[in-house]
Amino acid sequence: MKPRSLVFDLFGDYLRYRGGEVRLRELVQLMACFDVPEATVRVVAARMRKEGWLTSRKEGRETLYSLTDASWELLDEGRARIFNRAHGPWDGQWHTVVYSVPEAERTLREQLRKKLAWFGFGPLASAIWLSPHDRTDDVLAAFAHSPAIRLDTFSSRTSGLEADRDIASRAWDLKALDQEYAELLARYRPRLARYRAGALTAEESLVERMHLVHDYRLLPFRDPDLPPELLPAGWHGRQAHEVFLEAHGLLRARAEEHVDTVLGTT
């Protein structure tokens, strides 16, 4: 795990519920659990502050760090993708975004594609992306101030479920994603018994929980959260999500215990 990601995760899962601030020495102590040396923590904190992800203030001789509004917004968006799943029956509608970006704006085009994938859209063709969920307003809002990008959105239906499944198989690499879900299940499901028994120390629980989040979140950001009728047989995604939620909950108390010990809070 990269030190920058650790900082975001510590704020997102722990520090936000403990005032939203952390002293530099406390951040150093927490990062030491992941073998990140103090010098690296100082460099990362200073760099994140310069880039607008962190803000700082002085309290006596100590420096306290907190996240900026942009960072909290990013964390909230990411948390929603990791923890939430669509519920209810699918209405059969595909929501499509067709974009046009000048050839000279390659960086902007790549940013658009990454954002479309973030919102769960998949490419049916190079400039035609679609999703079974109505998130076109999110896409339009994200690029409302980018005049170089032209976006056309519409909703439509296919001739039936067979065509829908064919579209899903072409827009996303579901086979590869399912294999990664299966590998995560194989790694973490056997550990649930130890989590339930409280066999890990408080510090070990923090480290394990952070690794769990890191390993799992790589998948929802690529998972379009398709309705069950569009998924291949034997799909492991829902099982992986359930195991993730259970493990995340089981490790919570001991992990928070260690954070509170470092911060001197209860």
Image (cartoon, helix red, strand yellow):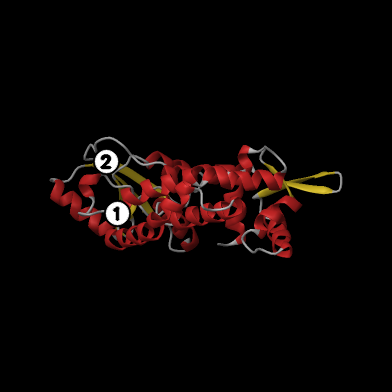
Which residue is at a point 68% across and 45% down the rendered structure image?
261
Q: Secondary structure at mark 1?
A: loop
At horizontal 86% and vertical 44% (from top left) the residue drawn is 60
Numbered circles on residues, count: 2
Q: Which one is nearer the viewer's eye here, 1 or 193?
A: 193
Labelled disc at residue 220: none
Q: Amino acid at mark 2?
A: Ser
Q: Nearer the viewer, residue 21 or 153?
A: 21
Quick one: 244 or 251, which is closer to the camera?
251
* Mark 2: few/some/many CA within 10 Å (<14, 14-19, 20+): some
Q: Which residue is mark 1?
A: 236
Which residue is pictured at 32% across the width and 48% down the height? 238
User: For this rendering, which residue is in front, 106 or 8?
Assistant: 8
Residue 143 visible to an observer of this rendering:
no
> Which residue does the numbered mark 2 point to in the structure image?
155
Percent of width and height locating residue 258: 63, 48
